[in-house]
Image (cartoon, helix red, strand yellow):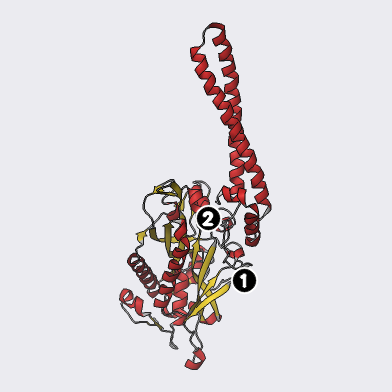
Amino acid sequence: MIDLKVLRENPELVRQSQKVRGGDPAVVDQLIAADEIRRAAVTEFETIRAEQNALSKSVGAAKGDEKTALLENAKELAAQVKAADAKRADAEEKAHQLLLQIQNLIDPAAPIGGEEDFVVLEHVGTPRDFTKEGFEPKDHVDLGKILKAIDTERGAKVAGSRSYYLTGPGALLEFALVQYAIASAVKAGFIPVIPPVLVRPAAMEGTGFLGQAAENVYHLEEDDVYLVGTSEVPLAAFHMDEILDELPIRYAGYSSCFRREAGTYGKDTRGIIRVHQFDKVEMFSFIKPEDAAAEHKRLLEWEKDFLKAMEIPFRVIDVASGDLGASAIRKFDCEAWIPTQNAYREVTSTSNCTEFQARRLNIRYRDENGTKPVATLNGTLVAVPRMIVAILENHQNADGSVNVPVALRPFLGVDTLIPA
């Protein structure tokens, strides 16, 4: 959540941020009014409670009729304190719920607009010209069948649409990608973590995934737990309600991820680009707020290094305001070239969430001036299915074989994936 001090001092800044994100700026004024009511209710409660405390001291020294009268007053004050406390709690809850509807304050450097209004920051690598090589590239579904690496038909039979099996070389390719990603992350100073994928509401809400993203979340109502769509959630909540003495702290979480993909009817129905379950290695940083922008660039560089190691052409985009999500002030996506789609598709993403998630999760750090909220950042190192798509399509040969990127060969033990 945002700092209420910013809201009180510069409400127009918050209104404008809500507007360019596609949120409701009217919530800002509703929150300002609710905050005033909350503060008045707190003052009223504390005033009456102070009277009650003073009266209690007087009762102890009084005798006879005076004591009887004071006890009667104490009884009335106790009822007033109870009513004032209930009024305060109600006002605080209403203000809190409105505060949860305010998205993070956008970075002034982020592009303004919707999903298609991103800015391309750079291109890395050159897409292959398959026409010059004398053959038409196959898509990852056909290559997966030829290699016996991907089985979407049996996936649909067993688990429904947008489901799949990775078999043989497909499964080995996942293991190789994860091992390389974790090895790279550890070398860069990240602590490897295998987190839970079932989390309580506080973790999901604290990271901002129960707002506009709620439609894509799986909720197990009987147990009131959620399946995570990214290990960002359990990694962020790992230090919930804690004070951290040393920063930065960097984690690399490997987990399965689950997404309902609501609202994507008709999109990417072929293959494994948009699926309900997939595995991912996610980087997560707890950092001092003043170091967050520099950390964001570091996360992006680690993502770029991974894609370069996979020998895949890609571009980096600066995501526009309306496509950021509630928590991020700025987000960079790396999009891999997919030959059969003649397009770049997102494969990794990194977001700077500043203190937004930490305030919700009550994560602070200690310095010489006391405690303050930390900044949190996240970045995908590898989302397995999409990376497999990019590798198969970009490194294929005319006979359906696929060259293995040099970086993965020690983990796979082969140079080429051969049709079965």
Q: Which mark is residue 239?
A: none
Determine the secondary structure under disc 2.
Answer: strand
Write the residue at 41% across / 46% down: 242
Determine the secondary structure under disc 1.
Answer: helix
According to the picture, the residue beneath numbered tag 1 turns out to be 117
Front residue of 368 and 363: 368
According to the picture, the residue beneath numbered tag 2 turns out to be 218
Residue 302 falls left or right of residue 409: right
Residue 258 lies, in percent from the top left, at 49, 60
Tell me the mark number nearer the camera, choosing from 1 and 2.
1
Write the residue at 35% across / 60% down: 192
Front residue of 11 and 203: 11
Residue 238 lies, in percent from the top left, at 41, 51
Circle 2 packing at 10 Å, graded few (<14), some (14-19), many (20+), is: some
Front residue of 162 and 2: 2
Circle 1 packing at 10 Å, graded few (<14), some (14-19), many (20+), is: some
Residue 247 lies, in percent from the top left, at 38, 55
Write the residue at 41% across / 74% down: 305
Decide if residue 49 is in sight here.
yes
Q: Residue furthest front?
A: 368
Write the residue at 53% across / 60% down: 328
Quadrant where the image shows the C terminus: bottom left
How many marks overall? 2
Decide if residue 278 is in sight here.
no
Is 238 drawn above or below residue 95 in the view shown? Answer: below
Residue 74 lies, in percent from the top left, at 56, 18
Residue 35 figure quarter: top right
Give the residue type that dot 2 points to.
Answer: Tyr
Mark toward the start of the polypeptide (1 vs 2): 1
Q: Residue furthest top?
A: 64
Give the residue type that dot 1 points to.
Answer: Asp
Instruction: State how far apart marks 1 and 2 are (Cα).
Output: 30 Å
